[in-house]
Amino acid sequence: MRPGGCRIHLCTALHRRFAPREELILIKSTKRRPLVQHLALTQARHALGAVVQRVHLNKEYVILERDGIPLAGVMDIDEFEDYLELRDPKARGDIRRSTTEYRAGKSRPAEDFLKEIRREARKVKRRRSA
């Protein structure tokens, strides 16, 4: 068991794999920091649906272990796609350029930008109705 007893909380829900579906859906965590659960690979294999559902709904992470050795991690697909995007050199370059522009004062308040977009939308609407 990991410090803080994290493993028991997830395993208890996973052992109820034949329980009604609402028992497997646990209440969302109110903690700001995502939970990291450690789970034996054999337990995850038996209740994979519950593990994936928990990761997706609660935005938690699950570390799969064999004999106490971490082998793999499970995370929500949105976060995984963000991770992959940040590994792309072009995306990193875009982020670096925009940060440089922001620090150089080449930004403007969102309110001004939204007003400009609304003005342009009104102009287009008037042209179409004319």
Image (cartoon, rainbow, N blue to C red):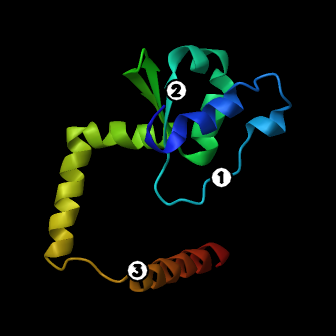
Asked which secondary structure carries label 1, the reply is: loop
Q: Position of residue 74 (x, y in %)?
A: 48, 30
Instruction: Say which of 113 and 62 sits in front.
Output: 62
Picture residue at 50% right of the left edge, 46% below the top: 35
- Do tag 3 and tag 1 residues touch (Cβ < 8 Å)? no
Residue 110 — which label? 3
Q: Earlier in the sequence, mark 3 or mark 2?
A: 2
Q: Report the side of 105 relative to 5 (left or right).
A: left
CA distance separating discs 3 and 1 = 32 Å
Which quadrant would the C terminus be assigned to in this image? bottom right
Q: Earlier in the sequence, mark 3 or mark 1?
A: 1
Q: Position of residue 122 (x, y in %)?
A: 57, 81
Picture residue at 62% right of the left edge, 72% below the top: 128
Above or below — where is 106 with respect to 75? below
Picture residue at 35% right of the left edge, 83% below the top: 109
Q: Position of residue 94 (x, y in %)?
A: 23, 53
Label 2, residues with CA under 10 Å away: few <14, some 14-19, many ≥20: many
Q: Which residue is mark 2?
A: 39
Disc 3 versus disc 1: nearer the observer: 1
Q: Earlier in the sequence, mark 1 or mark 2?
A: 1
CA distance separating discs 1 and 2 = 19 Å
For badge 2, the amino acid type reads: Leu
Question: How many discs mark residues in the rendered view?
Answer: 3
For badge 3, the amino acid type reads: Ala
Disc 3 versus disc 2: nearer the observer: 2
Q: Which residue is mark 1?
A: 28
Residue 36 — which label? none
Question: What is the quadrant of residue 102 in the picture?
Answer: bottom left
Label 3, residues with CA under 10 Å away: few <14, some 14-19, many ≥20: few
Asked which secondary structure carries label 2, the reply is: strand
